[in-house]
Amino acid sequence: MPIATPEVYAEMLDKAKQNRFAYPAINVSSSQTLIAAIRGFAEAGSDGIVQVSTGGADYLSGSTVKNMVTGSVALAAYAHEVAKNYPVNIALHTDHCPKDKLDGFVRPLLAISAERVARGENPLFQSHMWDGSAVPLTENLEIAKELLAQTAAAKIVLEIEVGVVGGEEDGVANEINEKLYTTVEDGLATVEALGTGDHGRYLTALTFGNVHGVYKPGAVKLRPEILAEIQDAVGAKVGKERPFDLVFHGGSGSTLEEIRAAVDNGVIKMNVDTDTQYAFTRPAAGHMFANYDGVLKVDGEVGNKKAYDPRAWGKAAEEGMAKRVAEACEDLRSTGTSLNA
């Protein structure tokens, strides 16, 4: 199928919320990890979301070029072509964008999509994230309000973060402390500033102890019940059940019980990166260890071209990551839910 249109993306999100499941949002940083993600969704019979971070976009442009817009546009162009060969709908998303990178990442991409829409085409990406967790909430929501008007005009969904995700991603680090828990007051301030969809659709990452990366059991205390408290309080205020379309950040390493509880409380998108990175790299490492005398020219020998051909270990890496994506679909109950089923 082609990359999801704005209308198809809206239908995907609506279906997830109505039927209490969520889409894995898989970070990619190359054409092969993109293919692995789409393959995993297809094998699970699930529509899905593929996303690129600022660091991933830098890398996609060439490790010595480091141009986030170039990398993002290149990924999107490639995805729009290869996605046609798979029977599921894929949405493209840009991940965490802090304030100091808005002008070099999200705003230029928004301008490209606005030009496309003005020509009668679909936007390049289906959603963009503004990560205002490092600035005061008032400033976070002021910028979000400005961006929401622009995304709505370009038929794009905005994602925001209210609260702080701990750990480190793309050089942005936050401590693991009480700031990881969004409050009811934060939720009320959000709808006061952005509405409940009447000014444009947005996804909200409310934090409930989320941490990027994988930690040993007990190091991170997730409290998904916070999501229910905020949904109920804000819903009572605006007269709407589960008013927020929620995003679960830092999903790698979470227990199935925590994941399902978050989904039951309105999560319709869960970011997965660390787990899929490992799932991609582990088979490649296994190939290298098992075929060391083929991938290396040991003791003056010539090695084995079939062993060091990047396609040999690349296929194994792709398969490993695709399986992990399919596992995420199962955890989030999206298996077999594609709009095309």
Image (spheres, helix red, strand yellow):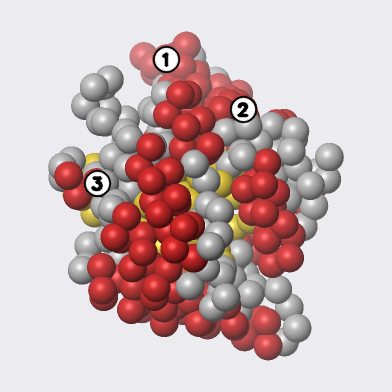
Q: Is residue 53 above or below residue 263?
A: below
Sequence-first disc among 3 and 2: 3
Callout 3 secondary element: helix
Q: Which residue is mark 1?
A: 289
Type of the residue with mark 2: Glu
Q: Which residue is mark 3?
A: 180
Q: Foreground residue, 99 or 64?
A: 99
Sequence-first disc among 1 and 3: 3
For the C terminus, the quadrant is top right
Callout 2 secondary element: helix
Q: Foreground residue, 240 or 127?
A: 240
Between label 3 and label 2, give the one nearer the viewer: 3
Disc 3 packing (10 Å; few <14; some 14–19; many ≥20): many
Report x, y in % for residue 272: 46, 39
What separation in Å lies between label 1 and label 2 (alpha carbons)? 31 Å
Farthest residue toward the top? 290
Q: Which residue is mark 2?
A: 330
Callout 1 secondary element: helix
Q: Foreground residue, 320 or 44?
A: 44
- CB of mark 3 within 8 Å of CB of mark 2? no
Q: Quadrant of residue 23?
A: top right
Q: Foreground residue, 182 or 281?
A: 182
Between label 1 and label 3, give the one nearer the viewer: 3
